[in-house]
Image: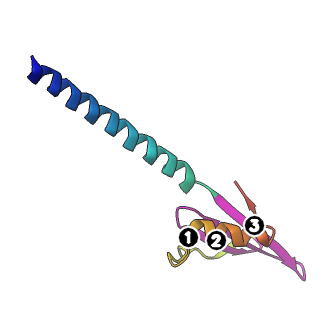
């Protein structure tokens, strides 16, 4: 009987661990969709920078993408987001 109790305890522990890991990865997936966009116009030309938590980056001039190289991993998303917000960017 003790063997069955231990088996069920281990099985329940494994199940709850898997649910916890799944829950964390879902939170991370939600954060990777966040993007911040900063635009400004100079002499009639609009420059737009978009950074996303998943590492993507886009630089466009008047809507034409000039660069879409992923941003460097030297900085964290929180650092980049903070800098962009301080310059007037909007994030979603």
Q: Is 42 in front, or is 73?
A: 73
Describe residue 14's horizontal placement relative to residue 24 as left or right.
Answer: left
**In percent of the image, x 34 and y 33: which residue is there?**
16
Q: Is residue 45 magenta?
A: yes
Residue 20 placement: quadrant: top left
Which comes before the other along the chain, label 2 or label 3? 2
Task: Work out whether 46 lies above or below 54.
Answer: below
Q: Which residue is mark 2?
A: 80
Q: Which residue is mark 3?
A: 85
Q: Which residue is mark 1?
A: 76
Instruction: For the N terminus, give its image quadrant.
Output: top left
Tell me the element at label 1. loop
Q: In the rendering, at what x and y percent does residue 36 appear?
A: 69, 63
Q: Is 42 in front, or is 1?
A: 1
Tell me the element at label 2. helix
State how far apart marks 1 and 3 are (Cα): 14 Å
**In percent of the image, x 47 and y 44: which residue is there?**
26
Describe residue 17's horizontal placement relative to residue 34 as left or right.
Answer: left
Mark 2: give few (<14), some (14-19) or many (20+) Cα within 10 Å.
some
**In percent of the image, x 16 and y 21: which residue is there?**
5
């Amino acid at each position: 009987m003790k063997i069955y109790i231990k088996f069920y305890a281990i099985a329940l522990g494994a199940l709850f661990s898997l649910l916890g890991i799944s829950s964390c990865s879902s939170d991370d997936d939600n954060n990777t969709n966040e993007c911040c966009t900063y635009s400004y116009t100079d002499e009639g030309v609009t420059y737009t920078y978009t950074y996303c938590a998943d590492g993507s980056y886009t630089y466009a001039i008047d809507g034409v993408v000039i660069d879409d190289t992923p941003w460097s991993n030297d900085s964290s998303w929180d650092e980049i987001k903070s800098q962009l917000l301080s310059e007037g960017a909007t994030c979603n």
